[in-house]
């Protein structure tokens, strides 16, 4: 997977998200406890046009952080999938196809939120400490 790829998030064989992705259709309930420590599952909704524009502006400025307003549309790498429900059938899909929950890859590897967490554990910032 590379940024820009679109995949079926409702695939029953998928138990953990392999990358950071934005939900394009459908909805999801995920367990983000490995990132946040929260034991309560989090609901994710598909992204709207305004949020996509905000993401585009964010990408132009080179920001690596996900805005808290956009987090409700993000499927973070390493989070466990509790349930993903398919949305409406996309207008470009043939009439015979079943509806799916689509997600677009935004980050992979150490660029993901999980990757940044692992990188901070492996290579901690030096602390200036005086007695």
Image: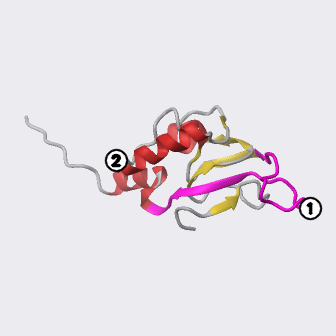
**Earlier sequence position, callout 1 versus callout 2:** 2
What is the number of the mark on residue 96? Answer: 1
Magenta run includes residue 64: no
Q: Is residue 5 above or below residue 81?
A: below
Colour mode of the rendering: secondary structure
Quadrant for the N terminus in the image: bottom right
Q: Position of residue 110 (x, y in %)?
A: 42, 60
**Which residue is the extreme one toward the bottom?**
1
Q: Position of residue 30 (x, y in %)?
A: 67, 42
Q: Secondary structure at mark 1?
A: loop
Residue 32 in sight: no
Residue closer to the observer: 121 or 19: 19
Residue closer to the observer: 121 or 67: 67
Residue 114 in sight: yes
What residue is drawn where x is 55% and y is 53%?
A: 77
Magenta run includes residue 96: yes
Quarter assignment of residue 128? top left
Q: Callout 2: 10 Å neighbours few (<14), some, many (20+)?
A: few
What residue is drawn where x is 66% and y is 35%?
A: 41
> Where does label 2 land, which residue?
61
Bounds of the magenta segment: 84-109
Quadrant for the C terminus in the image: top left
Please state if 111 lies on the left or on the right of 22 as rendered: left
Magenta region's main secondary structure? Answer: loop
Q: Mark 1 and mark 2 in contact? Answer it, CB < 8 Å.
A: no
Residue closer to the observer: 70 or 75: 70
Q: Is residue 23 above or below residue 7?
A: above
Q: Position of residue 118 (x, y in %)?
A: 42, 54
Separation of marks 1 and 2 at Cα, in angstroms: 41 Å
What residue is drawn where x is 59% and y is 60%?
A: 18
**Which residue is the extreme one toward the right?**
96
Q: Is residue 32 above or below residue 95?
A: above
């Amino acid at each position: 997977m590379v940024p820009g790829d679109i995949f079926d998030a409702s695939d029953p064989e998928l138990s953990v998200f392999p990358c950071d992705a934005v939900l394009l259709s459908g909805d999801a309930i995920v367990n983000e406890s490995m990132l946040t420590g929260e034991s309560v599952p989090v609901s994710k909704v598909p992204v709207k046009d305004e949020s996509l524009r905000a993401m585009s502006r964010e990408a132009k400025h080179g920001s690596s952080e996900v805005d808290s307003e956009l987090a409700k549309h993000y499927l973070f790498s390493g989070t466990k999938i509790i349930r993903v429900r398919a949305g409406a059938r996309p207008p470009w899909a043939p009439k015979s196809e079943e509806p799916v929950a689509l997600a677009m890859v935004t980050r992979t590897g150490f660029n993901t939120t999980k990757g940044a967490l692992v990188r901070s554990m492996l290579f901690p910032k030096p602390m200036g400490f005086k007695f």
